[in-house]
Amino acid sequence: MTDVNSIFNKSGGSATKKRGLHDLSNLVKRYKSDLDDEPTSEGPSVVHDDFKRDGSSTNLPPDEPLEDDEGGRFFGGGLTEEQREVLDYVEKYEDQVEDEKHDAGWVRRQITKLNRLIQRNAQLRAKFYDKPQKFLESEEVLDTAVKSLSVLTEHSKLYPTFVENDGLKIFGDLFAHENSDIVVDAVQVFEELTDEDTKAEDVDMKFLLNGAIDAGLLGALITNLGRLDNSKGVRGSEEKQADEDETEEPERAGVFQILNVVENFSAFQDTVDILFIDNTSKRRVGDTGLLPWLLQRVLVKEKPVSQNMQYAAEVLSIILQKSKISRVHFCQQEYTNKDLGELSGVDVLLRILAGYRHFDPPIEEPEETEMFENVFDSLAIVVQDLVGKDKLLEYEGIDLLLLFVKNGGKHGKARAVKVLDYALSSGSSSQLATDFVNNNGLPVTFKLFMSSRFADAKNHRSAAREKNSTTHISLDAVLGIIASLFRSLPDSSPQKVKLLARFVEKNFEKLDRLLLIRDFTAERIDRVNVLIDGERATFMKTRPNQKEDIEDWEAEMEAREAEWYIQRLEDGLFRLQLIDTVVAWLVAEDDEGDLGIKDNIVKKLAETKATLEDVKNTLEVYRQDILPKTPTTEKGNVDGATEEELEQRQEAADLAEMLAVLIEFL
């Protein structure tokens, strides 16, 4: 049987839009008939060489049409008066279409028209299944009608009307169409409808997205991820790939558009959860198969890395960041790979990263670099949950991350340190911290801590500057690892003793470095506080006298206080909190003074005109800041908080309790 898609691709582009007026249809048919009756020669019709626009001969190539004086289509020498009238009528009708009123009636007419075109095409396909030429024209008309639906993006307030009139059923039929070109065009239109650039109101966009979920469009979209070809850079020789590129590029573009739609769904919490599996909603749709496809896609070995592979990694990180449901299932579920067998999501991420443990992706390969960063981002996200920490331990991820820190490239080192910080923090298990020490994590960590990059104020970057650098190792992350080890390692364990010994060895050099950094940080915070106090004083002078204006002014004041607090955190407050947490742990562990740590702390603080009371004040403010503001009961929350929010509150309460204990030792 003839390949319908290849015929469709070579049919000369998009078909003319189907008009809605019966008399126009008849005129066009007569116009085509007149053209068919004109004499033709071998090959395409051309204007005779003796035609002269300005009195001189014209030597245009046979396939290049002449233009009129206005740069438009050529109207002379080959068109009859009636044909010119037809074209004038077409242009007049197009002007009318542009002025057409877009309302609920227009939406219903579009839906009716598309349903008829889909039905007509299906009938012709069934009747002439072995004669593609018989239904090709109906396919072109359908494709053009599908594209015209993108006008709806300019009238997003009609989205609810479109959904309520079963308009989304049309996309379900189109996503299942036998012609992949129509599938791709339908996906592109749906992507335009759901894109944030449409400037649709959240309520209208959510109505469309939730309607798409109820209509089963997610499953249809994700099914097409496996159906459409997106194998650029994967199969066969370069010569074979070059021959295939022209026909397969539209399908690869279709895969990219589907991933774009998935990203659009992730914009809202109630739709991002159901992208994968929704155990909490009454509309449970089950496993859509999205995450297995994404994992299989990023596991493919590609050189160079294609845009679709990079985008698959990016979409994966977006979903994992926004949906706890997806994170838990991602870690717990086993996925089957034909070459590697049963794998969990964390195992997949570690296998991909293992190939870069000695070097960064080439600078000249931006797609590969972005893919590498997105995979690291995904790992950093999942290890913040307990289930992700357990999987990291199970698959020896700590060992791999330490290899990155010791032997990796600049990007790999910096990202591995951040992932280790996330993995060891937030209620990390003692086993994970123990595994870190047993894999020689202490020498690696303190080598970073004592490196020249953190030696003086000049190189002592703020958190805000570190955040904008992909190659700079974060001092906050290094301090976070140390603080987490103190919290997680069992008391009196060999691993805890080794940690304490690091601050005693070589005449307390690590302790001296810690307090030196504290001095730099405290000075910078003092300077920031002076600036903020000035801004606050200036704003206080604007307090209105009228009672009706005070409420707005107080709301603005509250917003500014929040901004000032974030500024202080970024300029060193969070770092000071980490440092003083470590200082408090050292004092608590050497409460009897046997190790000499506590005495040295008091002595070094005095040299900078600071005391343990300053450390205590820092931790008390820290404790007050993180205390959950909303109480909970034994039966759960009292303010409609989600399960994830409740977990975060409990985690904050546990940290605040730990700080309260440390404060007592000070």
Image (spheres, helix red, strand yellow):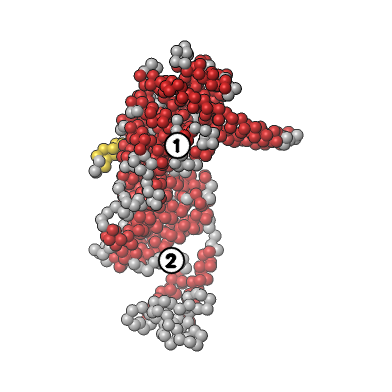
- Residue 483, position as x, y percentages in the image: 45, 25
Answer with the quarter of the image where residue 533 lies.
Answer: top right
Name the residue carrying label 1: 473
Q: Residue at x 26, y 57 (%)?
A: 237
- Callout 2 secondary element: loop
Is disc 1 placed on a helix, strand or loop? loop
Q: How many labels sit on residues?
A: 2
- Identify which amino acid the numbered label 1 is placed on: Ile
Q: How far across and down, in percent of the image, does residue 238 sit?
A: 28, 58
Q: Quadrant of residue 173?
A: bottom left
> For the view shown, which residue lies furthest in the front direction?
507
Tell me: 361 left or right of 338.
right
Q: Is residue 80 visible?
A: no
- The answer to which of 601 and 306 lies nearer the viewer is 601
Q: Looking at the image, tell me whether mark 2 or mark 1 is earlier in sequence order.
A: 2
With 197 as the anchor, is 42 left or right in this view? left
Residue indicated by mark 2: 18
Residue 298 rendering spot, x and y as whole percentages: 33, 45
Badge 1: few (under 14), some or many (20 or more) residues near its Cα, within 10 Å?
A: many
Q: Camera-side residue: 303 or 624?
A: 303
Q: Where is residue 68 in the image (x, y as percent from the top left)?
A: 50, 78
Position of residue 27 relative to residue 480, above or below, is below
Distance, label 2 to label 1, CA atoms, is 60 Å
Estimate how packed mark 2 is, as few (under 14), some (14 to 19) or many (20 or more) residues with alpha carbons within 10 Å: some
Task: Say which amino acid is labelled 2.
Answer: Lys
